[in-house]
Amino acid sequence: MQEQAFRFGRARHLVGIAGLPTAAANAVGVIVLNAGLVHRIGPFRLHVELTRRLNTSGYPTLRFDLSTLGDSGASGESQTRTRQVCADVGDAIQLLGRQAGCTQFVLIGLCSGAQNVHTVACTDEKVAGAIFLDGYAYRTVGFHLRHYLPRLFGPARWLRLLTRPKQAAGASDSTPVFAVERLPQSTVRADLGHMLDRGLKLCLIYSGGISRYFNHARQFRECFGRVVSRPGISTGFIREADHTYVLVGDRDRLLDRIEQWIFRNFPVEHEGDSS
Amino acid sequence: MTNLATPLEAETPLYFGPRGELFGLYHCEGTPARKAVLLCPSLGQEQIRCHRLYRQLARALAAEGIAVLRFDYYGCGDSAGASAQVDWQRCLADTWDAANELRRRSKTDHIIAFGARLGGSIALTTAAAARFTELVLWDPILDGKDYVARMDASQNALRIDPKRFSTPRQATDAADQWLGFAISARLREQLVAWQPAPPPVPTLVLDSLAPASTHNRRSLGTEQLRVKTVQPATPWDDPGRLEMAILSHTLIQAVTTHLRELT
C-alpha cells in the first residue's frame, strides 16, 4: 500500500497524508492530530509509525496538519482556535470518509493534540473513539502525597530544596498543565461522561514524562472519578517513558497498546469474515 | 503557465521517485521559474527541527519567482521506509531523483541545492551527479567520524537526563538510536567513512556555529568557496532544545538575498 498526499479542506489550506488499505471493510478511519507544533509526522516520526502499523491491519488513516501548523496554511476565516480545530478535523473526516468509505472515526492526539481530540470528540457525531496521550490531568492530593512524601525522608533532597533559587512569583502547584487554556477538572470529567453516554470508546495513556502533575495510574480515578471505571474507557500509565517517547522501545510499547485497544474496540471485518 | 489562485495552492504535496516512495512539496508561484532550488533536509531530529524554517525559506524563494522542492529521503518524514532503513547511498540517490523531479516540474536546468547540517553534506556529495549549479550549505557536517561520536555522546546523555526520565534508562534501552531515531550499523559505518571533497561548483557556506564549535572547512578547499557568518549562533547541539524548532529569519534573508543576486 502506498500513502497518498492531499491538499484539502474548505479553503484547500490543509495538508495531510492518507494511508488507504484496500483489504478491510467497515473499518473505522483513524485520524492523528498534531502534537504541539511538530508537523504531522509526529515527535520522532511517531505518527508515521502509528498510521503505517494501523494500515497494515486494514485501518484507513490520515495524519494531517491543522491550520497554520506544519505545511497547512490559514483558512482565512475569522473564528476562535477551538472552532477552527473542529472545522479542520471536520474537513479531515470528510476527506478520509470520501477516500476510504468509512463513516466512523477514531481520533488520536498527544499533549495539545489530546486537548484538540477532546474538543472535537465532545461534539462531532462521527467520532466513535478517542485516544488521549498525556491529555488533561490535574494534581490531586494523591499526587502530592506520592510526590512529596518520599522527599521528606531524603537529606539530599532537603539540601537541594533549601539551596535552590526561589520560584518565580505566580508559579505554584496550580500552574496550568497545558501551555494554552485548559478546561476545569469538573468540565473534563463531565465531558468524558457525556462521551461515554454517547457510546464513544475512550483510551487514556499517560507517560512518566508528565511527572510534574501526574505520577501514578491511580491518578486517573483521582482526577476523573468513577467515570474511569465505566466499561467504555481504558486507562494506562507508562511510567518509564518520557512525554514524546524518544526511545524506540518505549514507542513500540505505546504503539502496541494503541493497536491492541483499536483491535479490541473497533475490530476490522475482513472480506469473508462471518457476521 | 497560468498564475495559481493563492500561495497555498502554489504548494503541491506529492509523491515522486521511481517507485513513488519519496514525499515532496513543490513550491511555485506560477510564473515561469528563472531558477530552481532543491532544499535537502538534514537527518533525524534536525530534520524535524528545521521543518518550519525550510517551509518559510521555500515560500520566501517562491515569492521571488524561484521554484522550490522540499523533500524527505527514504525512511524520513512522510517518505516510505522505516527510520532504521535510512541509508547514506539511498539519500544520495534520492537527492538525485529529487533534482530531476524539480528539473521536470520547473522546466529549468539551473538547480541550486541548499542543505542544513547533514543535508548540506548530502548536497555537497551529490553536487556533480545531480548537476547542481551552485550550493548553499548551512553549518554542514564535514567530519562524519566526529558527527557519529557526538551523536553517540548525545544519545548517552539523553538516556540519563533527569529532565526527561525520572529514572535513568539502561544503555540497552537507548542502543542503536540517535535522539529519537533508530539507526543502522550500516549508516553509522557510512558516516564514519564519509570524507567531503572540495565542491565542484560555487558554494556559499553559511556559518552560524557557536564560537566554541569546530569551524574546520579545510576539506572544502578555497577555490569555489565563500563563507558568510550568520548571527545569532544556532543551538544545534543544545540538549535542552532537542525538541524545539530551529528558526532564523537572518538565515532566510541571507539565502534569499544571495539567490536573488545570482544570475
Image: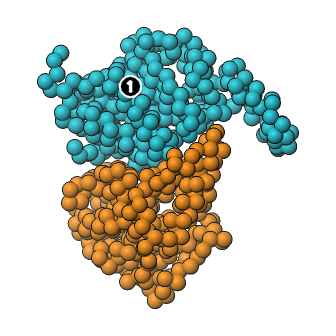
Chain colours: A cyan, B orange
Please tell me whether residue A35 is drawn above or below residue A185 in the rendered image: below
Q: Which residue was labeled with disc 1?
A: A261
Q: Position of residue B166 (x, y in %)?
A: 64, 39
Q: Residue at x 46, y 45 (%)?
A: A248
Instruction: Name the residue at 27% across, 38% down.
Output: A56
Split into 4 quadrants, where in the image is the C terminus of chain B? Answer: bottom left
Q: Badge 1: few (under 14), some or many (20 or more) residues near its Cα, within 10 Å?
A: some
Report the front residue among A64 and B79: B79
Report the side of A208 relative to A120 (left or right).
right
B1 versus B169 height, above or below: below
The residue sitting at 32% across, 25% down in the picture is: A263
Looking at the rendered structure, the secondary structure element under dot 1 is helix
> On the picture, is B101 further left or further right than B209?
left
Tell me which corner region of the image, top left, top right, bottom left or bottom right, holds residue B200: bottom left
The image shows residue B164 at horizontal and vertical percentages of 61, 43
Q: Is residue B60 among what the camera can see?
A: no
Question: In the image, A5: left or right of B143?
Answer: left
